[in-house]
Amino acid sequence: MTGQLRLDDYLQRYSETAPHALAVAAAVDAIASGSIEIADLTSTGLFADASGLTTGRNSDGDLQRDLDVQADAIIRRCLARLPIAALASEEMREPQIVDREGRICVAIDPLDGSSNIDINMTVGTIFSILPAPDDLGLAFHQRGTAQLAAGFVTYGPQTSLVLTLGEGVDIFTYDRAAKCFRLARRGVQISETSDEFAINASNRRHWDPPVRAFIDECLAGIDGPANRDFNMRWIGSLVAEAYRILTRGGVFLYPSDARPGYGDGRLRLTYEAHPVAFIMEQAGGAATTGRERILDLAAHNLHQRVPLIMGSHHEVRRVEELHCDPLLVASVSAPLFARRGFFRL
Ligand SMILES: O=P(O)(O)OC[C@H]1O[C@](O)(COP(=O)(O)O)[C@@H](O)[C@@H]1O
Ligand SMILES: [Mg+2]
Ligand SMILES: [Mg+2]
């Protein structure tokens, strides 16, 4: 591993390529150093004891863990020395305007998958880097296509940084001995088709008909229209699901559903869906709500949720097709009748 390109050398080369590149490279470098601190914290296991670790709720109503708060403080401290125009975090109520001269804006989910802390499963940090608009009030109302860079770090058996600077996806692994990230995989490509799906199936009765139809096709396997058997995974950590899809393909769904508060799913557009969708597309995959491309959307507010279906192109397109099926669509717009009628529940 020692011979592989270090992240700082990789960023140094990139920083000379475009007007925003220096600022983007500095932000990625700062987030990477913060992630090393977070990796050290998570690996101590001090957070694995469930007692007394909940500090309250964030502005979106999620239970906030001590590690959520610490991770947020670490990343913000690391970014504080940079001329960033505006900063947003899952743990902040509102975006913060930092430096009006700054060229970029950064949105972060400091700790993704925090319900996995107690059970010693992979968690992560997600980030999205956007250009600073003239009106900084619009910093986090840009379409996902505006992103200059995006990435996530996974704190699992390995600490890995998945990064796109808009020209493909590269993966870096943390070298603990040298205390730096090194390039492990260049130009990652997601397989066009796959036989693995991920969804929280406990919500099945709340799903809309197109989502149920897709999962029913997967479950029918070789006896159904898909004509092949599927495997299933659900980790409950977006970063870990995305990493798996980058490694061996698959489709992930966190759709909207009929539970109160889940009309737009669970995941947040600005600091979860946008960056992960950018990575999916840059690796040859796709990301959609079922009806619209995720990267075409712009958030109305910082913590806006969005249905997210992402991964191998073929399966994501199939979910979109089902969202256009007139029979299934008709049943979405008449939910009570349809749920009981079409699916005979
Ligand atoms: O518990 P559920 O409903 O299955 O939701 C799991 C999803 O929620 C998340 O944990 C949300 O992220 P946060 O932990 O940052 O709030 C995702 O990582 C994961 O995909
Ligand atoms: Mg998250
Ligand atoms: Mg989080």
Image (cartoon, rainbow, N blue to C red):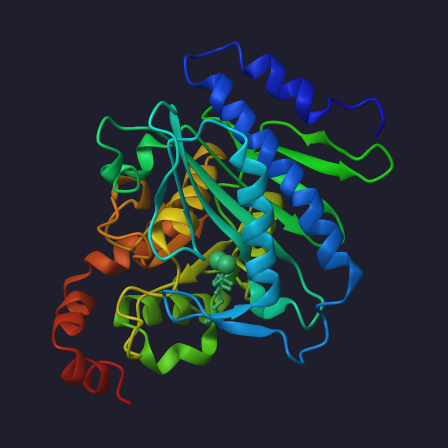
Classify 164 as above or below 64.
Answer: above
Q: In which quarter of the image is residue 84?
A: top left
**One can see residue 43 in this view:** yes
Q: Quadrant of the C terminus?
A: bottom left
How many dots with numbers?
Answer: 0
Q: Where is residue 173 in the image (x, y as percent from the top left)?
A: 72, 38
User: What residue do we see at 57% from left, 74% from top?
Assistant: 54
The N terminus sits in image quarter: top right
Whether residue 79 sits left or right of residue 340 in the image: it is right
x and y percentages locating residue 220 in the rendered image: 45, 71
Q: In this view, does 23 lie to the left or right of 2?
A: left
Name above or below for residue 161 compared with residue 234.
above
Q: Where is residue 272 in the image (x, y as percent from the top left)?
A: 43, 51
In which image quadrant can residue 306 be found?
Answer: bottom left
The x, y position of residue 156, in whole percent, is 71, 54
Q: Can residue 315 be seen in this view?
A: no
Q: Residue furthest bottom?
A: 345
**In the picture shown, does residue 87 fall above or below 194?**
above
- Outermost residue, top side: 16
Please give the name of the residue rendered at 56% of the width and 61% of the height, measured from the top-left corner: 68
Q: In this view, does 154 lie to the left or right of 282?
A: right
Residue shown at the point (30%, 67%) measured from the top left: 256
Identify which residue, 329 or 228, lies in the foreground: 329
Residue at the spot 32% in from the left edge and 40% down from the top edge: 295
